[in-house]
Image (tube, rainbow, N blue to C red):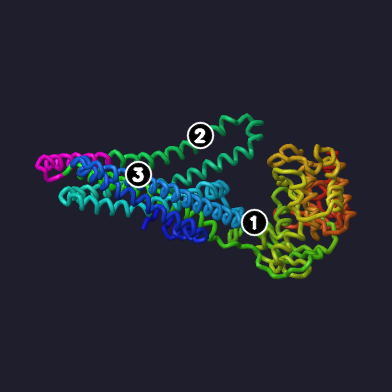
Amino acid sequence: MIKVGGTMSQLWMSFGYLKKYKKWTILGIVLIFFEILLDLLLPNIMSNMINIGIGKQDTEYLIIHILLMIILTIVGIIGGIGSTYYASKASGYVSMDMRYNLFQKITSFSFTQLDKTNIGNTITVLTNDITTIGSIMMFTIRILIRIPFVFLGSIIMAVLISPTLSLSLIILLPLMCFIMFILMRKAFPYFDLTQERLDDVNKQVRELVGGIRVVKSTTNESYEKAKFKKVNQNLKETNLKAIYLLITAMPVMMLLINITVIFVLWYGGSNVINHSFEIGSIMAFIQYLNNILGAIVMGSVMIVMIARSCTSARRYYKFIEEETSSNTGTINLNILGNIEFQNVNFAYSEGSGDYVLKDINVSIKEHDIIGIIGSTGSGKSTFANLIAGNYFPTEGDILLDGKTIRDYQTKVIKSQIGICFQNPTIFKGTIRSNLKLAGKFTKKELEEASKIACSYTFIMDKPNKWNYQIEQLGTNLSGGQKQRLALTRTLLQKPRILILDDSTSAVDAATEQQIINNLIHYKQHTLIIISNKISTLKWCNRIYVFDDGRIIDSGTHEALLDSCSFYKTIADAQMRGN
């Protein structure tokens, strides 16, 4: 069994995808036998034409066998083309299914799993690894099935032509197989390393493209080029080491086969003179010898491809077989908006003891307007993510309307708790297509949500309005426009709990105040506002002050000015700034 980072069992599991396309697979296998028949019969026919048709000057025999060769060639070509077509079709659809299944699997991951997912590795598996697996399926149908039949059939035909000359194969074949085994064994370890190096290249490209504006604005292009050159060089060198070892095999094989051909010509030629051997038989024997060589070389190529495919299959099934740690609750009730934290501790890495939130006890009633303030890294965003069900408490519990959040169905939590982040993701497409991610809505609901989020005016000023084309990552929108568009999208979900995680930070003060006023008067949700702007939070029913993962104080704006020095310091600093 081949084992190079991956296992044959995982690669074999991949072949299970072919069951869905067994009709095309079977056709590909059946048609390849026409090509095999051509390879095994033509040298023998050619031998008879030389020995009988030309040797005995039998013109009729020669013409009949020329026509037979033409017919066999046409049949072989049809079989080869048909086999390639159906094998490619089956493997292409399998690759499509595998990509879809992997994409579906990744979208089902919890936030905790996504935090641990290497994006560069994911892209490589989704593209390169699945393509490699698809290729091995096509070559298995086209070549792997062909190799043993051509190899054994050519040996049998060679023995039938000359048992004496066939003795040379006893030395030749084991020697060729031994050389290929040694070279491949040295090359195999580089396959895993090549995929890892490709992951590094993808990761580097993704980071560079995502941060290209920062790189250019700080004139660090030369530094980034040097980093990319290094990972690119590593990939090249690893690839070449494997290739150099493998290409060494061909000259060695050709040397051995040519020595054997020389022996055949010498031995056969001497027997032709003695009239105990015919020229056509020598030519046919050499042709079968070339068939055997071709089968061994193709077999070695297939072993290399299988080895690389094992690595790719291992990487693919590492994703597919990972258990999704999503919520398995059964409650399918509308959320009213009551939230309660009971002695909640949370760490992103379970068992690390490095708690981001510590001993959090909070009670929020339906339609409350709650403010969250605190220093950077104090746990504000983590608090919001716990309410939104993106993570679950490490210790303690969170109740929604008196029921533990773990008992709610994931779709209930995601559809009825809306969260807007400071850096929203805007997708390439139109404004309307971005808003449609929220689900179905009427024209009236669209206009109402956009007016509450103060996005209606700037959308109406855009060419084509709702059908305005947004570039990738929303690069043709300002930061404030992206935040308002993301808030519109969240409002169209009609959430019962709305969380703004510093999601108006890029909006001017007047517009931000207008948005907050609109949301306060909207009164169809429990509103939680995370911000470090006192002017944004002072209208809240209650404000919680976070520091180092703990709630150090809570109360109204006026009460905190008197009781919380941390809050008062922020307020005084912002007042002086104003």
The mark tally for this picture is 3
Asked whether residue 308 is drawn in magenta, I would say no
Instruction: Tell me if I can see residue 156 in this picture.
Output: yes
Which residue is more in the foreground, 338 or 433?
A: 433
| Residue to which mark 3 is pinned | 70
**Direction from residue 241 to residue 92 in the image, left or right:** right
Q: Whole-percent x and y of residue 564? A: 81, 53
| Residue to which mark 2 is pinned | 229
Q: Considering only order in the chain, which callout, 1 or 3, is on the residue closer to the N terminus?
A: 3
Q: Secondary structure at mark 2?
A: helix
State the quadrant of the C terminus.
top right
Q: Which label sits on residue 286?
A: none
Q: Considering only order in the chain, which callout, 2 or 3, is on the residue closer to the N terminus?
A: 3
Vertical relation: 343 (above or below) 63: below
Residue at horizontal 39 percent and vertical 55 percent from the top: 3
The type of residue carrying mark 1 is Phe
Query: Could you tell me how far apart the alpha carbons at marks 3 and 2 are, in whole angstroms?
Result: 54 Å
| Residue to which mark 1 is pinned | 111
Vertical relation: 129 (above or below) 255: below
Residue at horizontal 88 percent and vertical 58 percent from the top: 523
Query: Could you tell me how far apart the alpha carbons at marks 3 and 1 are, in whole angstroms?
Result: 64 Å
Which residue is more in the foreground, 506 or 272?
A: 272
Name, please, the residue furthest toward the front: 60
Residue range corresponding to the magenta coloring: 252-277
Q: Dominant secondary structure of the magenta stretch?
A: helix
